[in-house]
Image: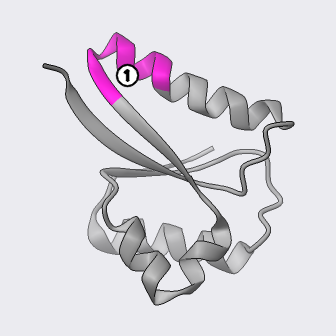
Amino acid sequence: MKKTIDIGVIGDYDEKKSSHLATTEAIQHASEHLFIKARVTWLPTSSFLTEAGLKKSGRFDAIWASPGSPYLSLEGAIEAIRLARETGRPFIGT
């Protein structure tokens, strides 16, 4: 059985942005190469502005700040980065 990891992608998903499609595809491609399964969940930047949203985001093994800004909530994106830093989760920003 493959190991499964959950990756939360910070960003306001827009299927018209090629960078958003490429981000999900890159994660899937890398996970296949590493023989793991990656579940990708896009997290709207505004979700990091509430206590409930911050708590929900705590379930992810890693956080990825997506390309293709501007974010709808820069404050929310910064809160997500703070969360990753303060909880020791792996984080990447592209």
Residue 88 position (above or below residue 66): below
Any magenta on residue 33? yes
Identify which residue is drawn at 33% across, 75% down: 86
Q: Which residues are magenta?
A: 28-37
Residue 56 position by quadrant: bottom left
Residue 27 position (above or below residue 93): above
Q: Which amino acid does the dot numbered 1 rest on?
A: Ser
Identify which residue is drawn at 55% across, 24% down: 26
**Label 1 element class:** helix
**Residue on which disc 1 sits:** 31
> x%, y% of residue 27?
49, 28
Identify which residue is drawn at 62% across, 69% down: 77
**Horizontal side, residue 64 vs residue 83: left or right:** right
Q: Which quarter of the image is occupied by the C terminus?
A: top right
Q: Which quarter of the image is occupied by the N terminus?
A: top left
> x%, y% of residue 59?
31, 61
> x%, y% of residue 33?
36, 11
